[in-house]
Amino acid sequence: MFARTRGCSVCDSWHDGAVSSAHETLTGKIATLEGILRDLGSVVVAFSGGADSAYLGAVAHRVLGADRAHAVTAVSPSLAGDEERDCRELAVEWGLRWTPVLTAEMERAAYRANDIDRCYHCKAELMDVVGPIAANEGATVVLGVNLDDLADHRPGQRAAIEHGAVFPLVQAGFTKDDVRAASRLDGLRTWDKPAAACLASRVPYGTPVSIEILSRVDRAEAALHRLGFRQVRVRHYGETARIEVEENDLGRAVVARLSIVDEVKKAGYRYVTIDLEGFRSGNLNNGLTDREGSSADPSRS
């Protein structure tokens, strides 16, 4: 059963309706998504370059054209450098109208405090920056949220809805697997792109977020990517980095441990550990209680 986003009646109603449509064929869901975008007329896609937003951006571009589909990427210390470069490359490859914009979530004390609603403050900042762009174009801000995301602790969804954003993938009944399958049908190279999330999701709740910490995590993860690990997380615990790789990469990580230790220490950590449970998307949410807003498995962090 889905655990719904706390205090968001709109998410609840979308969830109830979307679940009933989840059994539609993929072809039907694609047609529904295209119809939703046509009805919106003009959209600004919050384009992070992940599988979900990339697919939404590509479909919006195909259905509405560059004049009415604008992909916008929020650039800040919480966005990995590799992800920003990939957004730029995707925009060129697909011919998207694309704009990078600077967001200032780090200037928000509530964001830096890193409590369980950190994501709310980040998304509010995004909407404060992207909203005026959409208003100037007579467009609606659309986010690549899918049905599976509604099961997670994602207070950012609430902030987006409060600011007038729409989730077309949810409305069309897309799960994460649907997004990947449809992306593959369209020949999009993002169909199997590993899950990514803002770098702040590597920092345990209650540990203040800083530019220095985000930069350290970014350098460490980029180094692991260069060593050939596609899906990685570097969880930040002060001087200790807890590394997660996929289970089938654990053996390779042990073999490469000296290189891993060397690279992660260069990024600024003193101690380097490998989590033997392997990669678990968003596992820092596991300690949340119902009172705090969710007892569900974590989000895409």
Image (tube, helix red, strand yellow):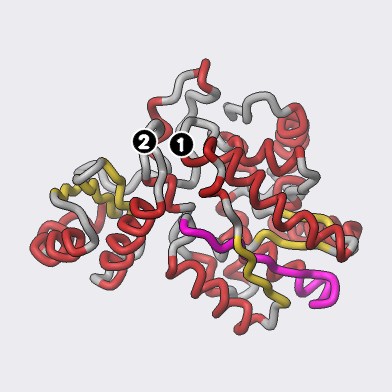
Q: Is residue 70 magenta?
A: yes
**Residue 43: x %, y % from top left:** 81, 62
Mark 2 nearby-residue class (10 Å; few <14, some 14–19, many ≥20): some
Residue type indicated by callout 1: Asn
**Cα separation between marks 1 and 2:** 6 Å
Q: Which residues are magenta?
A: 61-77
Whether residue 192 sits left or right of residue 31 in the image: it is left
Residue indicated by mark 2:
207
Name the residue carrying label 1: 114
Measured as percent of width and height from the top left, residue 195 is found at 46, 56
Asked if residue 9 lies left or right of residue 211, the reply is right
- Determine which quarter of the picture holds residue 99: bottom right
- Dot 1 lies on which element? loop
Task: Specify whether residue 244 is painted magenta.
Answer: no
Q: Residue furthest top?
A: 291
- Residue 219, given in percent of the width and then of the height, sits at 31, 64
